[in-house]
Image (cartoon, rainbow, N blue to C red):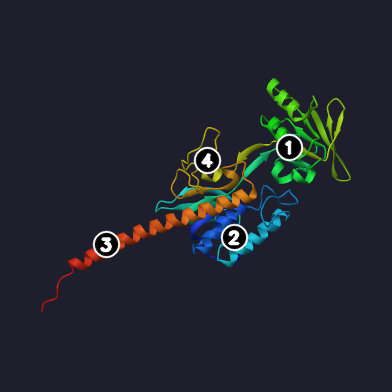
Amino acid sequence: MTGANNTTNTRTSYDVIVIGGGAGGLNAALVLARARRTVAVVDAGEPRNAPSAHMHSFLSRDGVPPLTVLEVGRAEIARYGAVHVDGRVDQVEAAETGGYVVRLAGGATLDARHVVLATGLHDELPDLPGVRAMWGQDVHFCPYCHGYEVRDQPIVVLGVHPASPGQALLLRQWSSHITYVPHGRPLTDEERERMDARGVEVAEGTVSTLLAKDGRLNAVELTDGRTLECAGVFLFPTMTPNDGAFDGLGCEKNEQGWLVTDRAGRTSRPGLWAVGNVVDSRAQAVTAAGMGAAAAFALNHDLVDEEIERALVEHRASADRSTKAPVPAS
């Protein structure tokens, strides 16, 4: 086991292990380390927003490359003694003596009283030429993250998801040149009426490929040969949470298969927490950071409560022994 911030670290037991080193995980670690908790962040180094050139809508970090933000975050948690571990978690298991065992790929294990899952989600993209290559550059999902950069320019929205019509209607806020391609998902009469009312053009057909010029998106080509020139493409990917590390622990999930947490990030299993995109597909980086902080505050209070209860048991046992001690003869 090596730690990116402390390669000589030999500790294997922590108050808290955070799985995932994005904004949510690092902010949780920062708050906990400042609360003088022993913390390790295990990170596989695959942030969801890595393809994006810049992060937006994050106060004081707007326009900063995402990887730069994470690099700064790792340095900040290191100042307070938190350890960054380069690795991938295979599984979290309940320890017989309480707490949890975190098993890393390769066989190493770490012990923790509490575990925070901040592993994000996986975007499943449509199998169309050009989409993966331009994902995060000229092909996007979130208008709040990337809509401003293509404001007032032609934008094409691909109808690859049930939520795609709503995405096109939302993007009309950023540009009056929105074209929606149903791509095999016919619009309902109501959806078509809303498109007409909102001023969104509908180009019937199916997309065959995304065309680039000088390394940047230039147009969308349909299967019938038509091309739609555009500065940006937006699509709604199928999102799957990366929550396999908690499999087998009995954490409650909702009807869609996502972990259920309270507002602080507690799962239904004591000692297990989840923040960011792993529980909320809508969470931006700034939202995930806030979720990480909220979980850390509540988690530390839970640890304090546990420690008080343990101290009370020891205090009462000590007091009981004192009252039963024999009185020395005078």
For disc 1, the marked residue is 171
The secondary element bearing badge 2 is classed as strand
Residue at the spot x=74%, y=49% of the render? 52
The secondary element bearing badge 3 is classed as helix
Q: Earlier in the sequence, mark 3 or mark 1?
A: 1
Q: Which mark is residue 259?
A: 4
Q: Distance from label 2 to label 3 (Cα)?
A: 39 Å
Q: What percent of the width, then of the height, locates residue 297?
A: 49, 55
Above-or-below relation of 322 to 203: below
254 or 248: nearer the viewer? 254
Q: What percent of the width, then of the height, locates residue 263?
A: 50, 45
Q: Distance from label 3 to label 1 (Cα)?
A: 64 Å
Q: What percent of the width, then of the height, locates residue 226?
A: 87, 28
108 or 135: nearer the viewer? 135
Q: Earlier in the sequence, mark 3 or mark 4?
A: 4
Identify residue type, mark 4: Leu
Let me know if residue 178 appears in the view.
yes
For disc 2, the marked residue is 84
Q: Distance from label 1 to label 4 (Cα)?
A: 29 Å
Please rate how many residues cluster around mark 2, counting C-alpha atoms within 10 Å: few if below 14, some from 14 to 19, many from 20. many
Q: What percent of the width, then of the height, locates residue 326?
A: 15, 70
Q: Earlier in the sequence, mark 2 or mark 4?
A: 2
